[in-house]
Image (spheres, coloured by chain):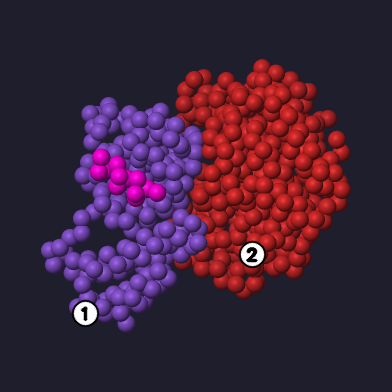
């Protein structure tokens, strides 16, 4: 992360940076600069190669992302000014950043380390449904995810109600919901025997007040856990987000930089997404003081990132950051299909495979376009993490991963627009025991066997 | 330089060049209403391409800016002529209270405007009552409320509840959208229409208005 003592200098630029009207920032500054940079660095999407093995391309994407961030900065909509970071400050932040952190507490602490391209060290695995869930299912779903053997960290499902009341952002119900969220998660962690497990929490908080309300080393989000800082829209922030930056730094927990560049939106196509992912990482490092970045690029219409136009920038940006930095970053899968469908298993496997060989850590898996309540289970995430571990341990190359990815894409890509919604959590899990139904487990096992036949060498 | 050139410039998002050519064409006696109609067709075509992601947001936004600039130049002449293209409908559009994510709403606004709707944009983080007051002032047909976060979706419900509370239920068609929003939510809160994406909004709203 950027040295904490820089925080005041950087954030002060919300008031001293260049003035720009909000309506002009994207069309007049960001979009033309991105277009110019993509051209300058000759970055070209190749749909036939979702996992390129072109080191020069990866390095050009790194340079392009650096230049984009340096030239464009981050816009604060509350002050109508652009926070800009100078070349030397970016260099300083990259030089002083740590390539590894101990996260979580006690016996559950895990060393999270930077990965290289085609690294044989398995990815750090953050399990997350990324979805909202009924209040009465929240604790069970926390338990179910925490039971997962490959889990290094967890981001729990999001509550929409607390004590039977609809949670309203920035109001008292949000505070209440955030506290309920962390209580359920802490209780579940203790119940499964992982009291110190690394949490990224709490997703129920949309407003800064919700996050601040749960900072407590005894019962809440601890300093050994992480929180996220997102953005409003592409490369736009506001004081409510920067409030978190200051709070997390001063509270002493880990800060994650949350970004979701939109394919088809202001970032344009695949090339723009790749460059923006790098730029976002640098922005998070320098402005949010982030210890890691959490990226979920997604398709404007589908809300997913499992098709090749998104896999390509994920692969290229991962390689760019792996080759040119020692930073930590997770690749967050977004699938089109819903739970207990073969399609969701294929999508997750493909996303995890492409990400792993490209140097990413894994954050799996938002299913059903991350749109429908209760539609996520640990089983799809389990398969993704197992693919990640296997791909790393067997030393899969990018070329091998590309061939496998093409085979997997052929199984689901043509259904992306009309993907099946599948089942809700309670339809494919025994809620009381937090275990998958036999039918669900059998489908997972069948797809896993298919993947093994394709050449994924699972350890078990 | 002709109307065809102007259509090309607008499609390419050349704001200043479009303005200059529109001015020139106007001086040459071009029919302003026909010009606007033909440019609207250009925008509809671009909107179709955008729905297939054959073009991306920057292209369509810039084209929208160029279109707006040209319309601003032509408007006085249209008004002076006494002819007036009928608006498809009047819409108060905003992002609900507590939600500061405006990108989806901005795309919907562009789609509506380029399809002939008159739009009053409340921006982001707009209180529920503001939607209703603005609709009353405008004489709106629709209230469009966007929410990008699950915890801000109740803002959409609150607008409908307020309309009922103050006796305006049915006066405006309430249209909702946003990433976490779906038909089930629309049914639950009693919204008149749920639009799954920006491209479908103009057509679905036009159909609703004709009912």
Q: Main secondary structure of the magenta part?
A: helix
Evaluate whether residue A393 shows in this view. Answer: yes
Q: Residue at x 85, y 44 (%)?
A: A457
Q: Chain of mark 1?
A: B
Q: Residue at x 57, y 20 (%)?
A: A136
Is A321 colored magenta in this rendering? Answer: no
Share a chain, discs 2 and 1? Answer: no
Q: Residue at x 36, y 65 (%)?
A: B42
Question: Could you tell me which secondary element the residue under label 1 belongs to?
Answer: helix
What residue range appears in magenta?
B200-211
Judge from the rendering whether residue A135 lies leftward or rightward of residue A363; answer left or right. left
Q: Where, quadrant-wise, is the C terminus of chain A in this rendering?
A: top right
Is B203 colored magenta in this rendering? Answer: yes
Q: Which mark is residue B27?
A: 1
Colour red, chain: A
Is residue A124 depicted above or below B71 in this figure? above
Colour purple, chain: B
Binning the other alpha carbons within 10 Å of mark 2 as few (below 14), some (14 to 19) or many (20 upward) gives some
Residue that badge 2 annotates: A45
Measured from the top left, where is residue A296 in percent x and y?
Answer: 62, 48
């Amino acid at each position: 992360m950027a040295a904490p003592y820089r925080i005041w200098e950087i954030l002060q630029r919300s008031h001293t940076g260049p003035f720009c009207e909000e309506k002009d920032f994207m069309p007049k500054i960001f979009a033309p600069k991105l277009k110019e940079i993509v051209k300058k660095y000759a970055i070209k999407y190749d749909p036939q190669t979702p996992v390129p093995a072109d080191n020069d391309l990866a390095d050009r994407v790194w340079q392009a992302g650096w230049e984009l961030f340096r030239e464009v900065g981050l816009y604060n909509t509350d002050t109508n000014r652009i926070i800009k970071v100078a070349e030397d400050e970016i260099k300083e932040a990259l030089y002083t950043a740590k390539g590894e952190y101990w996260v979580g507490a006690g016996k559950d602490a895990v060393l999270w380390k930077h990965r290289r391209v085609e690294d044989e060290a398995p990815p750090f695995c953050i399990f997350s449904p990324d979805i909202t869930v009924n209040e009465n299912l929240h604790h069970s779903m926390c338990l179910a995810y925490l039971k997962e053997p490959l889990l290094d960290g967890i981001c729990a499902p999001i509550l929409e109600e607390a004590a039977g009341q609809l949670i309203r952002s920035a109001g008292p119900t949000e505070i209440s919901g955030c506290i309920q969220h962390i209580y359920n998660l802490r209780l579940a962690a203790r119940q499964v025997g992982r009291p110190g497990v690394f949490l990224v929490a709490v997703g129920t908080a949309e407003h800064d007040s919700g996050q601040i309300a749960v900072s407590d080393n005894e019962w809440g989000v601890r300093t050994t856990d992480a929180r996220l800082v997102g953005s409003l829209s592409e490369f736009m922030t506001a004081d409510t987000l920067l409030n978190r930056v200051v709070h997390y730094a001063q509270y002493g927990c880990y800060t994650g930089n949350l970004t979701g560049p939109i394919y088809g939106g202001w970032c344009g196509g695949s090339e723009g997404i790749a460059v923006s992912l790098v730029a976002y990482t640098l922005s998070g490092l320098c402005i949010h003081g982030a210890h890691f970045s959490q990226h979920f690029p997604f398709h404007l219409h589908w809300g997913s990132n499992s098709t090749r136009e998104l896999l390509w920038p994920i692969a290229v940006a991962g390689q760019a950051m792996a080759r040119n930095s020692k930073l930590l970053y997770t690749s967050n899968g977004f699938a089109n299909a819903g739970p207990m469908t073969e399609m969701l298993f294929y999508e997750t496997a493909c996303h995890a495979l492409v990400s792993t060989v490209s140097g990413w850590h894994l954050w799996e898996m938002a299913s059903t376009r991350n749109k429908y309540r209760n539609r996520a289970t640990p089983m799809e995430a389990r398969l993704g993490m197992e693919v990640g571990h296997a791909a790393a341990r067997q030393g899969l190359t990018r070329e091998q991963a590309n061939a496998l990815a093409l085979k997997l894409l052929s199984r689901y890509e043509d259904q992306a627009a009309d993907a099946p919604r599948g089942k809700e959590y309670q339809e494919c899990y025994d809620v009381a025991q937090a275990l998958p139904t036999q039918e669900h487990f059998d489908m997972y096992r069948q797809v896993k066997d298919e993947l093994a036949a394709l050449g994924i060498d699972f350890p078990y | 330089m002709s109307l065809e050139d102007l259509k090309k410039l607008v499609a390419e998002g050349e704001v200043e060049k479009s303005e200059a050519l529109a001015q020139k064409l106007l001086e040459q006696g071009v029919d302003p209403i026909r010009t606007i109609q033909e440019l609207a067709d250009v925008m509809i075509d671009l909107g179709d391409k955008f729905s297939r992601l054959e073009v991306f947001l920057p292209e369509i936004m810039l084209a929208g800016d160029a279109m707006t600039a040209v319309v601003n130049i032509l408007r006085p002449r249209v008004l002076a002529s006494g002819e007036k293209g009928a608006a498809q409908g009047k819409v108060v559009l905003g992002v609900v209270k507590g939600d500061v994510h405006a990108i989806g709403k901005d795309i919907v606004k562009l789609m509506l405007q380029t399809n002939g709707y008159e739009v009053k944009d409340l921006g982001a983080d707009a209180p529920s009552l503001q939607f209703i007051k603005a609709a009353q002032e405008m004489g709106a047909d629709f209230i469009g409320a966007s929410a990008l976060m699950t915890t801000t979706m109740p803002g959409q419900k609150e607008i409908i509840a307020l309309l009922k509370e103050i006796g305006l239920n049915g006066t405006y068609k309430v249209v909702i959208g946003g990433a976490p929003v779906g038909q089930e939510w629309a049914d639950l809160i009693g919204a008149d229409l749920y639009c799954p994406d920006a491209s479908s909004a103009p057509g679905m709203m036009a159909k609703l208005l004709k009912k």
